[in-house]
Image (spheres, coloured by chain):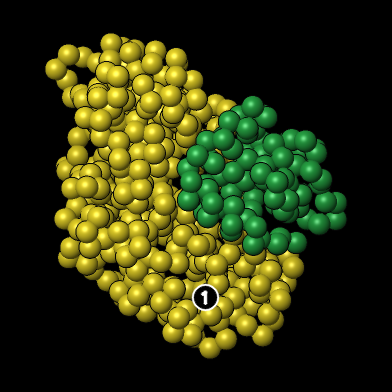
Chain colours: A yellow, B green
Amino acid sequence: MRFVDEFRDPELARTLAGQIVALGEPGRHYKFMEVCGGHTHTIYKHGIEDYLPPSITLVHGPGCPVCVIPMGRVDDAIHIAEQPDVILTSFGDMMRVPGGHGSFLDAAAKGADIRMVYSPLDALKIAKQNPSKRVVFMAIGFETTAPSTALTVLKADADGVANFSIFCNHVTIIPAIKAILDSPDLRLDGFIGPGHVSTVIGCEPYRFIARDFGKPLVVSGFEPLDILQSVYMILKQLAEGRCEVENQYTRAVPWAGNARALQAITRVMELRPYFEWRGLGFISHSALKVTDAFAAYDAERIFEIPGVRVADPKACQCGEVLKGVLKPWECKVFGTACTPETPIGTCMVSSEGACAAYYNFGRFTRERVREAART
Amino acid sequence: MCLGIPGQIIEILPGHGDLAVVDVSGVKRNVNIGIIEETLKPGDWVLIHVGFAMARMDEEEARSSLAFLRGLGQAYVDEMDALRDSQLE
């Protein structure tokens, strides 16, 4: 039982798996989407799908912030980096994401000053140290990361750092989930709700999923047992004819979220009318931009942004993977033309991307687990 | 950047905005604790994301998360490397 032993509490995992099997309605097939890339990572790393009965499929959602950035925005950022006296700063995850004309790493190799930072506050520090340069932070991420960017802008303002700005690509999770629910491509039975995003937004914003779409959602932690327990909680709701938002990850997620973090976001950012997501297309009110009050820190107003839309490479099926329509290995170029070393699509670049996670950990197959369970 | 990593507060830095020194797996770095509503003190554990403490956690949860994150392999190594390069002030 090697696979079971990878769980922290193998006994509890066995019990949960047994209860999950018992709760399933005979003959019914269930599709649950895990929204967050961190969950996808856990699911592949620990072979959780292999541990579930074949009647349950876990579908990977759009919750990888790097993966949903369209190629055109990468090109826009590189365009900013190529302006005189600009230092573009970015999280490491973005560096290898290909735009229409190469990645940040490619642009840096051609002479653009693009630097990796751990925190937006590191970018602000670079601005303070280089007063003659214009330092731009490539801001990406869901509501987990947006408060950090917002607080950094507030600090730049408080400290009077005039040569700092952000290229805002922050996205919001709720409209993406709604777009998936509205899409005819996919029939889902429930959601494993994101963990860290929920530390900020809390559990209330998911209510419409249960109320209007009749799907249960359980906010989940990141460990294998958390995910198994969340699957159990979703199935239990379905078995009892309930549709609710439940919180499995009470250890870190308060029901009301984090008011201070939300206030920081709303002070500095407001919703855009629409934003393009890779794979999902244009979604209304799904991303954040800098408010007029902080226009001085908005790279989109300081620089001319080409804003050219770039179609994904024909061979790339990241869109289908992000919507959960395709499993990573069903993409035509998975593991052949597209690998973590030479990624074509974003899902292969980020370690949270479904393709990279599957490529790195996809050694667990249903067949092998059944075999292991017999020994 | 997507990971949240638990760290233990070593020292609150008065007069430095909302900064505190935290210990993340032996790496001591400054992080911003301005988002946390409760008053933090040395010894408390927090979930850290891109240089900011996002939530307070209990020690047991923090230790089990750390063990889990270490098991992630490359993603954890990358995150720790990025953290090592961070010098917030």
- In the image as oriented, which residue stretches furthest toward the left? A27
- In the image as oriented, which residue stretches furthest toward the bottom? A84
Foreground of the two, A297 or A65: A65
Q: Residue, x 58% and y 58% (percent of image)?
A: B82
B66 left or right, relative to B42? left
Q: In which image quadrant can residue A22 be found? A: top left
Answer whether residue A374 is visible to the viewer in this image. yes
Badge 1 density bin: few <14, some 14–19, many ≥20, Cα 10 Å? many
Q: Residue, x 35% and y 51% (percent of image)?
A: A356
Foreground of the two, A182 or A15: A15
Residue type marked 1: Ile
Q: Residue, x 55% and y 72% (percent of image)?
A: A115
- In the image as oriented, which residue stretches furthest toward the front? A375
Residue A298 rendering spot, x and y as whole percentages: 54, 71
Q: How many marks?
A: 1
Residue B15 rendering spot, x and y as whole percentages: 85, 55
Q: Residue, x 66% and y 44% (percent of image)?
A: B25
- Badge 1 marks a residue whose secondary structure is strand
Residue A180 rendering spot, x and y as whole percentages: 27, 43
Residue A318 rendering spot, x and y as whole percentages: 26, 55
Which chain does the residue under circle 1 lie in?
A
Task: Identify the image quadrant of the C terminus of chain A.
Answer: top left
Foreground of the two, B37 or A228: A228
Q: In which image quadrant can residue A186 be found? A: top left
A138 left or right, relative to A72? right
The residue wearing badge 1 is A114
Determine whether A50 is above or below A107 in the image: above
Determine whether A28 is above or below B46 in the image: above
Task: Identify the image quadrant of the N terminus of chain A.
Answer: top left
Answer whether residue A214 is visible to the viewer in this image. no
A186 left or right, relative to A105? left
